[in-house]
Every structure is written in structure tokens, then in C-alpha cells.
């Protein structure tokens, strides 16, 4: 997911994501999740597991993130990764998507969701 002031430039955001992902990060808990900060930019990565999809949140803030902000957003991102994995498991089992949007609806906004 990409959030913040990227001026609709997904290529720049993805380049920053790749650069931050290559740096050593700070672990969050014992699940393999981590975060990396660089000034106002930060990346939160949720490790893939049977319960969570491989998911990353990249943010360009207006100020460097506080420790509490990083941990709150890490929990939020982990929750989304769990929901995403639950949906993938349901689709694989032929149960469809319990959280599917109605036909023709769009979930795309300034925040873009995509798997790494």
C-alpha cells in the first residue's frame, strides 16, 4: 500500500519502497515483521505466514514518524495482511470473496493496495 505525498507518482514510490526494503530494519515482535525509516519516508513490512499475506505499507509523511505511530500502523497493516490472506484462502477453497465489492465498484483511491 502506498500513502502520502507521492504526487500520483507510483514509480517513485515503488523505487523508494525497493530502496527501503533493501535496508536492515527494526523488528516488530517475533513474526518477522519490520519497519525501516528514512526521514519522512517509512516502510512497514508484514512477513508472509499461513495467517498473513506478504504486505508492505509505504508512507511519505510530513514529519518523521514517532515510535508509537510506527507500532500502531504496523498493527493496522498486519490486520490488513490477515484479512487479505483470509480472502485468498477463501477464494482458493472456492468459497468466493466474503468481502467482495459489488460489480463495477472500485476500491482504488489515492491509497493503492498491491502485494509486493
Image (spheres, grey):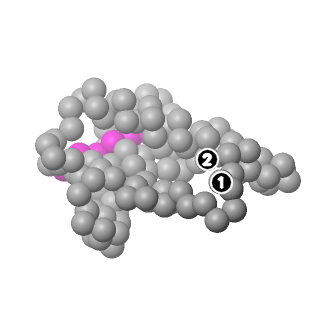
Q: Which one is nearer the viewer's eye here, 14 or 31?
A: 14
Q: Is residue 4 above or below residue 66?
A: below
The answer to whether 8 appears left or right of 39 in the picture is right
- Residue 94 is situated, as x and y percent measured from the top left of the image, at 85, 53
The answer to whether 17 appears left or right of 85 in the picture is left
- Residue 110 is situated, as x and y percent measured from the top left of the image, at 37, 59
Q: Residue furthest right?
A: 94
Sequence-first tag of 1 and 2: 2
- Residue 106 is situated, as x and y percent measured from the top left of the image, at 56, 61
Residue at x 30%, y 34% (from the top left corner)? 70
Q: Which one is nearer the viewer's eye here, 104 or 97?
A: 104
For the residue labelled by badge 2, is the local secondary structure a helix, a strand or a loop? helix
34 within the magenta span: yes
- Neighbor class of circle 2 (other Cα within 10 Å; few <14, some 14-19, many 20+) is some
Q: Are marks 1 and 2 in contact (CB under 8 Å)?
A: no
The secondary structure that dominates the magenta segment is strand
Residue at x 79%, y 52% (from the top left corner)? 96
Q: Which residue is mark 1?
A: 101
For the residue labelled by badge 1, is the local secondary structure a helix, a strand or a loop? loop
The answer to whether 42 appears left or right of 92 in the picture is left
- Neighbor class of circle 1 (other Cα within 10 Å; few <14, some 14-19, many 20+) is few
Q: Nearer the viewer, mark 1 or mark 2?
A: 1
- Magenta stretch: give its range: 32-38
The answer to whether 75 appears left or right of 23 in the picture is right
Q: Which residue is mark 2?
A: 84
Cα separation, mark 1 vs mark 2, equals: 14 Å
Amino acid at each position: 500500500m502506498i500513502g502520502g505525498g507521492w504526487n500520483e507518482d507510483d514509480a517513485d514510490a515503488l523505487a523508494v519502497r525497493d530502496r527501503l526494503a533493501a535496508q536492515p530494519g527494526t523488528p516488530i515482535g517475533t513474526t518477522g515483521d519490520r519497519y525501516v525509516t528514512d526521514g519522512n519516508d517509512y516502510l512497514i513490512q508484514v512477513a508472509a505466514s499461513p495467517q498473513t499475506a506478504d504486505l508492505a505499507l509505504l508512507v511519505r509523511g510530513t514529519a518523521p514518524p514517532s515510535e508509537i505511530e510506527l507500532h500502531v500502523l504496523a498493527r493496522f497493516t498486519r490486520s490488513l495482511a490477515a484479512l487479505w490472506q483470509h480472502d485468498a484462502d477463501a477464494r482458493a477453497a472456492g468459497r468466493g470473496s466474503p468481502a467482495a465489492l459489488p460489480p463495477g465498484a472500485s476500491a482504488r483511491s489515492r491509497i493503492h493496495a498491491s502485494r509486493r
